[in-house]
Amino acid sequence: MKRKLTAFVMSMTAFDRDFALDETALRAHLGRLRDAGVGVYIAGSASGEGFSLSPQELDRVLAISIEELKGHVNIRAMGCEVRHVEETKEFLRHAGRYSFDAVHIFPPEMGHATKPTMAELDAYYTEAIAATRLPVVLSSYQSFGFELPADLLDTLLQRFPGQIASFFYGGHDARYLAMMIGRFADRIEVHCAGPSQAMTTLALGGHGFMGHEGNLAPRLVRSVITAFQAGDHELLRKAYAGLMGIHAIHYRHGGPTRAMKPLLDALGLPGGTLRPPRKAITEAELDKVIQDTLKLEIPELQGLTPRG
């Protein structure tokens, strides 16, 4: 397959001060992503706070994302971690009501650090993929304690010809990532989750990366791809340094939402409130985040005046 490089943003979901879905802010946020030309994963469990969405809210978020993004950028339904296949099939039913470019199928988390066998994974993925007509994205997360076996992915590609569009890896094992790129990048897209392995993925022949950082600076995320394609090493260095700078700032606070939403609001960009049990960082912490962010001198944030 011809290698088409892509950067995806794991989109946040906007809520108002009463913790209700803020459709106006969500549309404005998705518009920023659309105008930047980045792909979007919607309704995820981390940036998207997907676990907090009711079934009705999930449908609205999915519908709005299609209205705002379909035909402009690659739009994929993300979903949340699952314990069994019926949870996966329920999410696939929601996503199947809309014309997504693809839908992600999480690996199963079996509880108490139990690792699924090859036979269990085979049965799970076979039943899940058969439950949707949409193209699917499979993944492997190091935090789950097991990897998606390469031999199983090969079997699934043969069992469901043309339906598996992409695979991504979230972890730090460059050997596993290199093996999956070498074995599958000529048949499906292979991305990494998070920017830490972005350069490794691109250099090894993968198709790009994904992460939450583009909620703040989607044009910066896109510029990493365009600089790599152009062979502009200095632009690539600057863009990737900025991307990793954002990554470092937000992971000081344990993830992609506690500081991101307050920062967006402070900069006059659509952000919103976090839903409990998640809580935003303190005002003192936010002041530090704003200062550190502005020091990165990210072009698309230049001229924004923090609200005081």
Image (tube, helix red, strand yellow):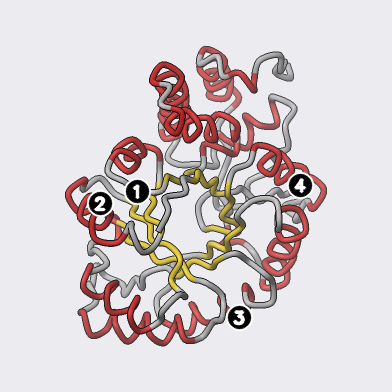
Residue 15: % across, % down: 72, 49
Which disc is residue 16 wearing?
4
Q: Are marks 1 and 4 in contact (CB under 8 Å)?
A: no
Callout 1: 10 Å neighbours few (<14), some, many (20+)?
many
- Measure the alpha-carbon separation of dots 2 and 3: 31 Å
> Mark 3 or mark 1: which is in front?
1
Tell me the quadrant of the picture where the C terminus can be found. top right
- Report helix, strand or loop for mark 3: helix
> Mark 2 or mark 3: which is in front?
2
- Report helix, strand or loop for mark 2: helix
Q: Is residue 179 left or right of residue 33?
A: left
Residue of label 3: 93
Residue 215: % across, % down: 60, 39
Residue of label 2: 177
Tell me the quadrant of the picture where the N terminus can be found. bottom left
Q: Is residue 16 left or right of residue 293?
A: right
Q: Earlier in the sequence, mark 2 or mark 3?
A: 3
Under mark 2, the amino acid is: Leu
- Report helix, strand or loop for mark 1: loop
Which disc is residue 206 wearing?
1
The residue drawn where x is 40% and y is 81% is 160
> Mark 3 or mark 4: which is in front?
3
Task: Indicate the quadrant where residue 259 lies.
Answer: top right
292 or 225, which is in the foreground?
225
